[in-house]
Image (cartoon, grey):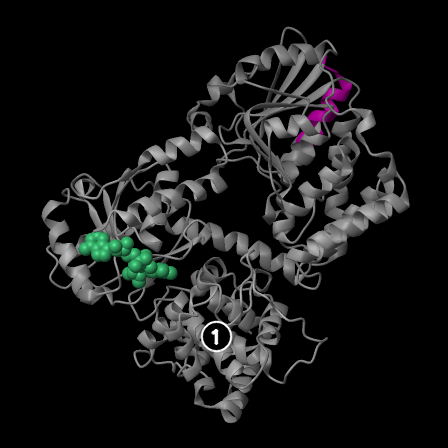
Amino acid sequence: MGHMLDALSPRLLETGPVDLAAAPSGTNFRRGRDAEGVEWLLLDMPGRSVNVVDQSMLEELDGILGELERNPPKALVIRSVKPSGFIVGADIKMFDGLKSAGEVEEALGKAHAVVDRLEKLSFPTAAIIHGNCLGGGLEIALACKRRIAVGKAKLGFPEVMLGLHPGLGGTYRSTALIDPTEAMTMMLTGKTKSARAAKRLGLVDVAIEERHVAAAVSALAKGELKSAASDGLMDKALATGPGRRFAGERMRSKVAERARREHYPAPYALIELWQEHGGDRKAMQAGEIRSFASLLVTDTARNLIRVFFLREKLKGEGAGKSGIRHVHVVGAGTMGGEIAAWCAKSGMTATLQDVATAPIGKAVKSAARMLEKVLKDRIAIRNALDRLIPDPNGYGAAKADLIIEAVPERLDLKKKIYAGLEERMKPGAILATNTSSIPLEDLRDGLKDPARFVGIHFFNPVSRMQLVEVVRHDGLSEETLKTTLAFVTDIDRLPAPVKSSPGFLVNRVLTPYLLEAMLLLDEGVEPEMIDEAAEEFGMPMGPVELMDNVGLDVGLAVADELRGRLSTPIPEAPAWLKEKVEKGELGRKTGKGLYTYGKDGKPEKKRHEGTIQRADLTDRLVLPLLNTSVAALRENVVRDEDILDGAMIFGTGFAPFRGGPIHYARGRGVAEIVKRLEELAEKYGERFAPDAGWADLRQEERAAA
Ligand code: NAD
């Protein structure tokens, strides 16, 4: 259905008396009054595929509200005519150029006045919501007296992902309208609600299909559209200070499981605001503006907004449609099985081939588990499973638009398979490899059509790792590259184009970091302390636990593969690590590695006491990662810093609120980092020697200053 709505022409949306063809140019809204006296206000911001809340939109709305006050209609309905939905949020660029929290407060005050004006209108008002209704869009809808959700509407407050909380009245309108615990959860998690779930909460008053919109509007005009929010819902206990303090405490400890206050202040600020002032509209409004403004000027919010644009940039790398409908995957192991399942989930036909039948069976079983988690909807799960086709004989290879090879990491095996595939492939189809370490130049050697051969390097698990490296080589055609990048965005992953070089980007940058953690273990530092240092820096998981997750066997193999082939040194792993691998203690997958794993799959960690930080611990972990990033940049493994930062954030979870490795390095100061690396090199060895690439960054820094 979501797809159907996307394909709907705006003409098929109920738009009352408004003639869409006769839109005044240069304006955001079109309007008209119908025979029943209902004013239809249609939002259609020019030059954009989605509507946002921005200065121009608010100013125009303010003018219209003034006119409606003077000449009141029977009712007012606001809706979007963009097929994509209602409003996706406030334009993040709206606050560009505002330097201080004071300036932000002033701008917000003006915006609030417009939304308050909408709220105070004397006649019935409703937002008609289809598609996305997020952030500032939901805040405008909340200022209407009623909300009509249409079809597969999605409502939510994603501000927290940008290091913010709602800033246009959302914090008090949502907590006053529905169960405040539910409203707070929405704002603290950023998760969206479907139309049906929103109706259950009372966030929308009706959830209907498009064909019933006209009737709902008629009911609104007659004063017959009932509110779904019941007055009794607001828990009496939460109307009192002590009740809110208790509830807030619980929220805070939940948030603390996922985000540290020093890294992510927004959820904590929101909880405090509500604890302090919940129920007191005036104090909430003043507090919301103040809190939002002070959050907006933090490094965290700035960097998370940067991350938002990095994501857009990576998506932009894969702009356009790939036209790929059928993917054939050869090798149904750890990677191939999930790659095929993910393609099926994305609406493609996926045929899955292996030399043995057992891996295919296993892959289909785990595909069912994965799809249940990500899709939830029973029909969608069944349809996706129908598109995933076991293909032991490899018939799909002749029909596929794209073939992805994911067999074991052996050059001879892969080349033999390519020779067979090239015989049978459809003309124009693309042949891709999921190799992590074999140079593409070695693999393309001997192919009939190297221009159509490319690397598509997925990360494990495919369903959770957003990044995919698209690997170039010297014989690749621009057209193949473009189609491949578009394919990656088609399946809802983020493509990072990289050069074929050992470890590509992500594995190369991660390896020195992981190995340094192994050397620290070798020196007798507690694993818990190493992980804590990395998590304190902002990594989602420490390097010791990460190594266990990757698998000690895989991690060691990657390090061995890279050692000696790079301009940057990779230290030898301690001997006991190899012994562990020989003993089969491979990490999480075997229940024991560097940690021991319980039934819940979680590592058993000893709590270490307080902050007995060892000298240099954090820098010994983080600086090799930065040093290698700079080397990769110098060698043009990626085209620019933003792609590097985005790839490390989406590929490894590198502390998002720091904006990426290079962004962090620049912020801390190139000269300071080079000095620290030299100190570490002196103390611990040449592996810390600053890369030649730092000089380039320094020069740019000087030029900018
Ligand atoms: P795997 O051993 O789990 O699976 C490989 C599958 O290929 C097995 O099921 C095997 O039966 C099958 N196979 C072997 N010979 C075949 C043939 N001639 N025809 C068809 N199928 C055949 O391996 P994996 O971990 O999925 O890795 C596959 C590729 O992906 C490798 O190139 C690896 O470097 C790369 N990779 C792995 C990871 C990871 O974390 N495991 C991550 C990224 C990339």
Q: Residue at x 34, y 72 (%)?
A: 557
Q: Residue at x 69, y 53 (%)?
A: 255
Single out the residue that lies furthest toward the bottom. 682
Q: Residue at x 37, y 68 (%)?
A: 554
Position of 129 with respect to 501 (left or right) is right
Q: Which residue is mark 1?
A: 513
Q: Residue 542's image quarter?
A: bottom right
Q: Residue 392's image quarter?
A: top left
Q: Is residue 248 above or below residue 116?
A: below
- Name which residue type carries label 1: Tyr
Q: Is residue 225 above or below residue 564?
A: above
Q: Position of residue 434 (x, y in %)?
A: 29, 57
Q: Is residue 10 above or below residue 26?
A: above
Residue 547 magenta-highlighted: no
Position of 590 with respect to 680 (left or right) is left
Q: In the rendered view of the protein, which quadrant contains the C terminus?
A: bottom right
Given residues 271 and 310, the one toward you in this image is 271
Mark 1 residue crowding within 10 angstroms, few (<14) / some (14–19) / many (20+): many
Single out the residue that lies furthest toward the top. 35
Q: In the rendered view of the protein, which quadrant contains the N terminus?
A: top left
Residue 73 magenta-highlighted: yes
Q: Position of residue 623 (x, y in %)?
A: 52, 78
Position of 393 with respect to 568 (left or right) is left
Region rendered in magenta: 61-74
Q: Position of residue 640 (x, y in %)?
A: 41, 64
Given residues 349 and 446, the one toward you in this image is 349
Q: Residue 428's image quarter?
A: top left
Q: Is residue 325 above or below residue 596?
A: above
Image quarter for ligand 1: bottom left
